Amino acid sequence: MQKCLHCGEKFTYKQILRSLIGGLTYSNLICNYCSQNHEISIPSRLIVSIGIGGIPLVPALFLIRFSSSLVGILYCLISITTVTFMSPFILRFKKTKLVSS
């Protein structure tokens, strides 16, 4: 898990997951201790997007074509869920401007 780049406090799993799936877009993460604003870095966004979109879909297409479509759909759902819940360990943040109190 990543720490705050300003004060060094560790972000919780829940905070990071909420910044990833908190809405329809990526949202910023604000440190609870120093109010430093963090955003998900571009390479992290790319890795998670490929992990959620690309990796599960290719094998699922083969499973749907050569097996039952239910197996392909289940594989796709399990893969996307696994990558989503593992992504807080992969994501990296960068500092943005300090939020004024």
Image (spheres, grey):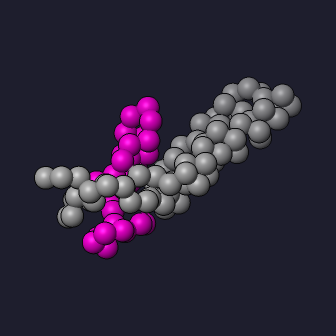
Identify the residue at horizontal 42%, vertical 66% (top origin): 1
- Whether residue 48 is in magenta: the answer is no
Residue at 38% across / 60% down in the picture?
95
In terms of depth relative to the viewer, which is nearer, 24 or 68? Answer: 24
Q: Residue furthest right?
A: 66
Estimate the x, y position of residue 99 in percent, counting from the top left. 23, 52
In-image side of 88 versus 100 (left or right):
right
Q: Per the image, is 9 magenta?
A: yes
Residue extending farthest to the bottom is 8
- In the picture, measured across the screen, residue 17 lies left or right of residue 55, that is left
Q: What residue lies at 21% left-to-right and 64% top-to-bottom?
A: 34
Quarter residue 71 falls in: top right
Q: What range is drawn magenta here? A: 1-30
Q: Position of residue 47 (x, y in %)?
A: 61, 52
> Is 63 displayed left or right of 88 in the figure?
right
Asked whether 88 or 68 is in front, the reply is: 88
Instruction: Check the image and report above or below for 65 versus 42.
Output: above
Q: Is residue 99 above or below residue 49?
A: below
The image position of residue 89, as x and y in percent, is 49, 61
